Amino acid sequence: MSAPSAVGKLADTPLAHGLVYARNRRLSGRLELTATDDRRAVISLWCGRITAVETTPLGMCPGGFFGAVVYELGFIDSATLDATLLEIAKSKRLHGEVLIERKAITAAQRDEALVEQVHRKVHHLFSLPETTSYAFYDAKMAVTEPPIAVDPVGPVWRGVRDYPPTKFVQETVRRVNDHALRVTAGGSARLPPAETALAEALAARPMTLSEMKAATDLPPSRVELLVYLLVIAKCVESVSGARTHPSTGALPTSMPSGPIPRVSVEPRRASGASFPATPPSGGVPAHSQPPSSRSIPVAAGSASRIPAAPGSSRIPAAPGSSSRIPAAPGSAPRISSTKIPAVGSPRPPPAGTLAALRSPAELGVEGIVARAATVTDEDYFQVLGVADGASAEAVRAAYVRLAKTWHPDRLHVDFIPIRGDVATVFAHMTRAHQTLCDADARRAYEASRKAKSTARPRAEVLREIEHAMGRRDFDTVVQLCEELLVADDEDVEAMAIQAWAGTRAGEASEDELRAALSKLDKAVNRDRTNDQAVYHRGLVHKRLGNVAAAFRDFARAVQLNPKHLEAEREVRIFAMRARKGSGEHKLVAPLVEKMSKK
């Protein structure tokens, strides 16, 4: 084995800096991480992009199993997951191959799941302690393009958001100080909508850190994290000439980067294309720019095979850049900031009107996913973009117009992978239309709205629920949860707690437990990101002896909320018993071993 090109500790070089450095320098090779507790990980890189992440032991990242990912993305149901897990345990084949062979998923869905799997695994690696050592082994860039190549900026954002390297962020903020920054490069790095909007505002005009904080609803600490990421990724520059790139966190400059071939910009590229070289206003030629600002070399004719990270938006390119890659026809426009419109842009329509509601093409993948997660909280008048108390005729007209863009059967091919999220939004629009156009249903709905406006604060009721659960006063818990559901019939957490309390914390009969499981399935299907609903369903599965299903739910709850101590404890117990070969948990050992395979 060749000697590593660079070694060190995460305390001196955070994982964010290592991955971004590899991205900026277009490095190919592998980054090996070794924690003091013998946890290990290998991140494979091709031309600065992540192609695979392997962890040891296999259960190190519970939410990163391929089967769990495709299930949680809604591509398969639990019956298909269980059946294929048994099949791959016998055949030793890749999970993705088995699912495609059964026509349970498409090749595009497999690739989307693989990209999400990379994001989850990298995110988990940010939880490794600072004492973890790293070693980078350089390798020649493969001639053929790998099937999956993920821009590290997306996974890095997830990591620094939840595990911020505080001293490096503070150093970056100190260097930025009051200098105005502007975005100078864009491309395939995906960020959530709010962060994308702020980055687009920076592309429209320079802003200081204090101006950024005032221009967004993001918490100030989140703005600082975003600036930190944009700075180390070299996506921004200081218009006042200050040096904003921090040197404290960079990998050794002696780390080889290898030759960087120049490529011509195609008139059309896939959504996963590289960051374009965007010269500043002075018009610096491409050949004189530093290596980190050039495009990632892509094998001829193969760019369309690099799947973009699903469910997110791009960092915008600087406006007016001649080297900017135009979007493919029919692709979704990027989300723009509503707080700082670009110079000369039209005034946005008033909020709460039909004109203000964006179509799927305008929202983009990340925007659609975000809206699907919150649409059930929207008032029926609000979701249709009509005035409060609008007539049935106005409601009907608004619904017909929205159906032309939001009906799942009218989707552009780019949005097929998230058809379920579009269907969620459209279903709520349909319920709103049916309710507001039916006189009796409308009166009942307006009465419930009035009841919600007089309801107690949710936090106060949740505190009472917690105290009642501690006293094992399950009848009171059920009543309190009902109070929350009267105020909001889509309160998934209240549904889950009520179902669990109805089983008297798992002491009910098997029939009652199965009835509760059905309720919890409905709660999870309404909001697959609610860690409490997933955790309580895992508890019921455990009581019923559904070992594999319980383990998956506990692992998913930890992935959704790393601070969920009860779920984390359950995962540790399952893994420990699996290692000991316990008869009770004999199904967990092959599950832990096989679920991480694609």
Image (cartoon, helix red, strand yellow):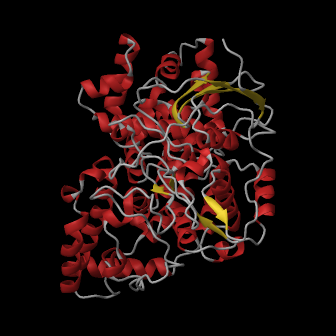
Closest to the observer, 460 or 554: 554
Which residue is located at x 44 percent, y 62 percent?
A: 322
Which residue is located at x 18 percent, y 56 percent?
A: 409
Residue 333 visible within the image: yes
Quarter of the image that includes the N terminus:
top right
Residue 371 % position (x, y): 41, 63
- Tell me if residue 165 comes above or below residue 569 in the rendering: below
Residue 453 % position (x, y): 49, 81
On screen, residue 335 versus residue 232, left or right, reads left
Residue 166 % position (x, y): 78, 52
Closest to the observer, 565 or 36: 36
Q: How many marks?
A: 0
On screen, residue 235 versus residue 550, left or right, reads right
- Tell me if residue 323 comes above or below residue 402 in the rendering: above
On screen, residue 86 versus residue 565, left or right, reads left
- Tell me if residue 177 comes above or below residue 520 in the rendering: below
Examine the image and state in which quarter residue 24 appears: top right
Closest to the observer, 370 or 486: 370
Which residue is located at x 39 percent, y 77 percent?
A: 448
Residue 71 visible within the image: no
Which residue is located at x 56 percent, y 41 percent?
A: 559
Quarter of the image that includes the C terminus:
top left
Residue 69 % position (x, y): 44, 37
